[in-house]
Image: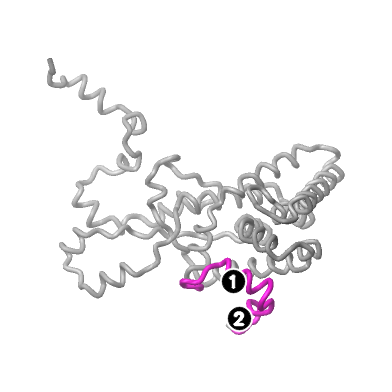
């Protein structure tokens, strides 16, 4: 037999945390009416959101919340940040071009390694160059709001054709990694060894010269360990911390990087094509484009 909830039982139910009840924690942040939230969603405090998601060492408030994957962000200052991102990409390509061991491999192996490892290489370059960036959340468009406010069809089409942005969860993961690298105050020599370890990472790759690539990565890792042991009096705690960050770099979503930093410039083109042109077909193309702007 079912009984109506008493005052005490209703009070206890109200105190159940959102995460225990299976609800998204984001749903508990506002007590306004549904209609009020729909009409005022994009007029919330941008400063408060900026402090939560763009400050050093910030972590997403609702960790593991599926809403973070649905929330989309773009750069707050795309012109300046995209230019710096292109500079990092250019320096990364120059680093690769200056490695004779990389060009000794078959072209097919070079292509696979670039395709699989460009994203962690790029993030490592962002860390070395100290490139931080601020974000702006894209307001979710509401069909009901369009109807109630009688927005024109032209405005609706423009809104629908705008950039979809990158996943907040993926971008926040990248920002947190950048700050961890900066906390370690990694030297230029350490960054060079780390780039070698990442570039020659052959995990889950089908390569013609697999043993050769593996030996190059082991050589870079050994050089890093010896350098840290010499500079930090035999302590390998730093080496272990850096290795953990390298492992985390492999989880960075390449699509989020491309969408956030390069989609406003590349349009429908892919970054893989740009990298191949930069490294093989037109090595000076990227530099000429940057100097002409």
Horizontally, is 45 left or right of 129 in the view? Answer: left
* Residue at 53% across, 60% down: 257
Q: Quadrant of residue 146?
A: bottom left
Horizontally, is 12 left or right of 208 in the view? Answer: left
- Dot 1, crowdedness within 10 Å: few (<14), some or many (≥20)? some
Give coordinates of residue 233: x percent, y percent. 86, 40
* Residue at 72% across, 39% down: 240
In the rendered image of this protein, does residue 19 appear above or below residue 121?
Answer: above
Give coordinates of residue 74: x percent, y percent. 44, 62
Q: In this figure, which residue is indicated by the disc labeled 1?
A: 274
* Residue at 33% across, 59% down: 139
- Dot 2, crowdedness within 10 Å: few (<14), some or many (≥20)? few
Q: Quadrant of residue 94?
A: bottom right
- Label 2 residue SS: helix
Q: In this figure, which residue is indicated by the disc labeled 2?
A: 289
Sequence order check, earlier mark of 1 and 2:
1
Q: Main secondary structure of the magenta part?
A: helix
- Label 1 residue SS: helix
**Is 140 within the magenta?**
no
In the rendered image of this protein, does residue 115 appear above or below residue 181?
Answer: below
Question: For the residues carrying marks 1 and 2, which lies nearer the camera in this image?
Answer: 1
- Residue range in magenta is 265-292
**Is 285 within the magenta?**
yes
In the rendered image of this protein, does residue 251 appear above or below residue 287?
Answer: above
Give coordinates of residue 243: x percent, y percent. 70, 43
Give coordinates of residue 161: x percent, y percent. 34, 70
CB within 8 Å, label 1 to label 2: no
């Amino acid at each position: 037999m079912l009984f109506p909830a008493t005052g005490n039982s209703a009070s206890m139910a109200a105190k159940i945390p959102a995460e225990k009840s299976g609800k998204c924690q984001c749903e508990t942040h506002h007590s306004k009416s549904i209609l009020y939230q729909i009409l005022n969603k994009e007029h919330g405090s941008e400063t408060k959101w900026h402090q939560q998601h763009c400050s050093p060492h910030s972590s997403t408030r609702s960790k593991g919340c599926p809403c973070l994957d649905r929330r989309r962000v773009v750069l707050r200052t795309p012109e300046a940040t995209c230019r710096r991102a292109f500079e990092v990409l250019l320096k990364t390509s120059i680093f690769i071009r200056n490695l004779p061991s990389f060009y000794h491999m078959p072209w097919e192996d070079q292509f696979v390694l670039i395709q699989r490892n460009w994203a962690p290489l790029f993030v490592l370059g962002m860390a070395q160059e100290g490139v931080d960036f601020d974000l702006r959340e894209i307001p979710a468009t509401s069909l009901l709001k369009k109807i109630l406010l009688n927005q024109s069809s032209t405005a609706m089409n423009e809104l629908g054709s705008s950039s979809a942005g990158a996943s907040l969860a993926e971008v926040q993961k990248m920002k947190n990694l950048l700050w961890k690298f900066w906390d370690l105050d990694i030297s230029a020599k350490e960054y060079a060894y780390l780039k070698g370890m990442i570039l020659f990472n052959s995990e889950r790759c089908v390569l013609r010269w697999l043993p050769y690539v593996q030996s190059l990565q082991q050589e870079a890792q050994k050089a890093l360990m010896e350098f840290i042991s010499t500079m930090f009096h035999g302590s390998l705690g730093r080496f272990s911390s850096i290795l953990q960050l390298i492992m985390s770099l492999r989880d960075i979503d390449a699509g989020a990087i491309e969408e956030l930093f390069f989609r406003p410039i590349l349009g429908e083109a892919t970054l893989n094509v740009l990298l191949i042109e930069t490294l093989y077909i037109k090595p000076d193309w990227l530099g000429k484009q940057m100097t002409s702007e």
